[in-house]
Amino acid sequence: MFCRVHERFEADGSVTRVAAVCDAKLLGKKFESGGRVLDLKVHRSFYEGKRASAKEVLELLGGCKSANLVGEKAVACGKKAFGRAPSYKIKGVPVLLVFKA
């Protein structure tokens, strides 16, 4: 899997972290179904960071306020980290978006 953490510095000095995790075999591809588009070619830089194992992804997700996860492996990690969060599929590719309060 590829993972990348995006950080935003808030006015109160805190940092909001967003994890982007994508199964390696999906990066650089585009999927369309029912009017939904998942373009991992155009948005490659959002997901492409370092390669990580499932264990590393789980550790990374623990420190993030939200996450965008794409692919079987990535979504499985997200469900382990965040519980039974609902996911959806675009042309058979699972997608999970998580936002913690």
Image (cartoon, grey):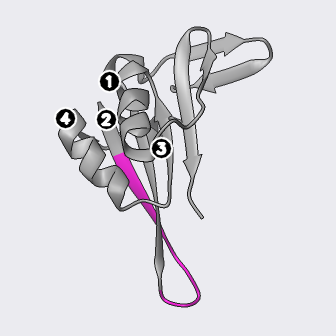
Residue 6: image x %, image y %? 44, 58
Q: Mark 1 or mark 4, which is nearer the start of the sequence?
A: 1
- Residue bearing the label numbered 3: 46
Q: CA distance from mark 4 to mark 3?
A: 18 Å
Q: Is residue 25 visible?
A: yes
Which residue occupies the foreground of this view, 56 or 23? 56
At a point 36% along the width and 48% down the height, the residue shown is: 4
- Dot in front, 2 or 3: 2
Q: Position of residue 60 (x, y in %)?
A: 30, 53
> Residue at label 1?
24
When asked about the image quadrant of residue 82, the answer is top left
Residue 35: quadrant of the picture? top right
Q: Are marks 2 and 1 in contact (CB under 8 Å)?
A: yes
Q: Earlier in the sequence, mark 2 or mark 3?
A: 2
- Name the amino acid, label 1: Ala
Q: Look at label 3 and name its amino acid.
A: Phe
Q: Which residues are magenta?
A: 4-13
Which is nearer the N-term, disc 3 or disc 1? 1
At a point 33% along the width and 42% down the height, the residue shown is 3
Residue 57 at x, y percent in the picture: 28, 43
Q: How many marks?
A: 4
Q: Residues within 10 Å of mark 3 (few under 14, many from 20)?
A: some
Q: Which residue is mark 2?
A: 2
Q: Is residue 77 left or right of residue 75?
A: left
The N terminus, quarter of image = top left
Q: Could you tell me how far apart the alpha carbons at marks 4 and 2 are, in whole angstroms? A: 9 Å
Q: Amino acid at mark 4?
A: Ser
- Judged from the image, the secondary structure of the residue bearing numbered disc 4 is loop
Q: Classify 10 Å Cα crowding around label 1: few (below 14), some (14-19), many (20 and above).
A: some
Q: For mark 4, what is the residue?
A: 53
- Observer-side mark, 4 or 2, equals 4
Give the residue type that dot 2 points to: Phe
